Image (tube, rainbow, N blue to C red):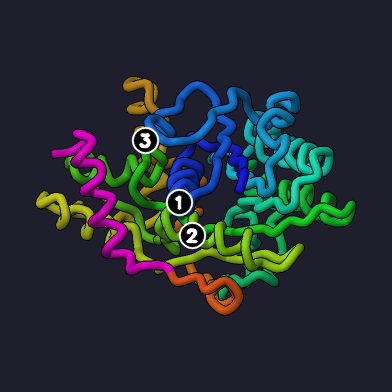
Amino acid sequence: MKIAITGGSGHVGGNLARALIAEGHEVRALARKDRRALDGLDLTVVAGDVLDPASLVRAVEGVEVVYHAAARISLKHDDPVATRINTEGARNVVEACLAAGVRRLVHFSSIHACSPNPPDQPIDEARPLFDDSPLAYDRSKAAGEGEVRAGIERGLDAVIVVPTAVIGPNDFKPSRMGRLVVDVCKRRLPATVEGGFNWVDVRDVAAGALAAAARGRRGERYLLGGEYLSLHALACQVAACCGVRSPWFCSPSWMAKLGVPFASLYAAMTGKEPLFNAASVDIVRHHGLVSHEKAARELGYSPRPLRETIADTVAWFRERGAIR
């Protein structure tokens, strides 16, 4: 089957491409300049991005299924680039799929597009969108789902998958979570902050998306979650895999926020994006309770143990020479 992926060079996109190739599909990946995640794979790369409609036409022409995985993650209150990529980009993908007569679109949303309230109840597919979030990423991903819904009303066959916090191998750039793993192994993370995430293996996200394409019901959402673990517990498991000392301190949120200016200063001095800011300190207290029962029931979704994911991720970074 001929299949196209947007965001093919990203963490999710690269693993998705590997899963599709393993099943014998003919894959076309829309990618920008950094294509390390696709190097050596038996696929066709289409240069472009979701804000370039002409490149989208080239990517989806003649394919049966499109996986829309392109996104920009941002922790800013206002981020026009993230808003354009996550919202306008979704609209462009919908238009390209409708024009090309694509049989099915699988759209990747995010758990952060879901409202965190009420916080004491598990998030499932019925949870409203977080369209009034203080963060541009949350709002733009919620709006992106809206664009896909509008396409469905115009006749598009689409399903929406909603991953939680993604972690796992083949993380070339790396992602924010990949940076956390590397920093723990290099003992550059002496402390963590209270809170955690529902974590999911990127390979299970890819498998869930393939199942959604094959068996998902038109217009439905499917949450692809895994296992909740605090950031401190995750860092301790990573440290154990690396054979290094665990972070010695877990900071309460109020104390972590006091350290935000220093993290920003360090990032400015090193030319790197801050690993945390005031928004990320709040984020780790949300979206912890997640139910993927619907995906398990309808798609046969079954995520692996998080301990296995952590071990495989550490091993992958070690093989790449990123850690010892």
First in residue order: circle 3 vs circle 2 = 3
**Overall secondary structure of the magenta section:** helix
Q: Report if residue 19 lies within the magenta region.
A: no
- Residue at the image point whose x is 25% and y is 41% from the top: 317
- Residue at the image point whose x is 33% and y is 68% from the top: 305
* Residue 261 visible, this orientation: no
Q: Disc 1 on helix, strand or loop?
A: helix
For the image, the number of numbered tags is: 3
Decide if residue 79 is on the left or right side of residue 177: right
In the rendered image, the vertical position of residue 53 relative to residue 317, given as above or below: above
Q: Nearer the viewer, residue 38 or 239?
A: 38
Could you say where residue 214 lies in the image, as x and y percent from the top left? 62, 63
Q: Amino acid at mark 1?
A: Ala
Q: Which residues are magenta?
A: 303-324
Could you say where residue 59 lies in the image, as x and y percent from the top left? 66, 32
Q: Disc 2 on helix, strand or loop?
A: helix
- The residue pinned by badge 2 equals 207
Q: Name the image quarter holding residue 128.
A: bottom right
Decide if residue 84 is on the left or right side of residue 171: right
- The residue pinned by badge 1 equals 19
Q: Amino acid at mark 2?
A: Ala
Alpha carbon separation for disc pair 3 and 2: 20 Å
Alpha carbon separation for disc pair 2 and 1: 7 Å
Per the rendering, the mark at residue 28 is: none
- The residue pinned by badge 3 equals 172
* Classed neighbour count for the residue bearing mark 2: other residues with Cα under 10 Å, few (<14), some (14–19), many (≥20): many
Q: Disc 3 on helix, strand or loop?
A: loop
Residue at far right of view: 154
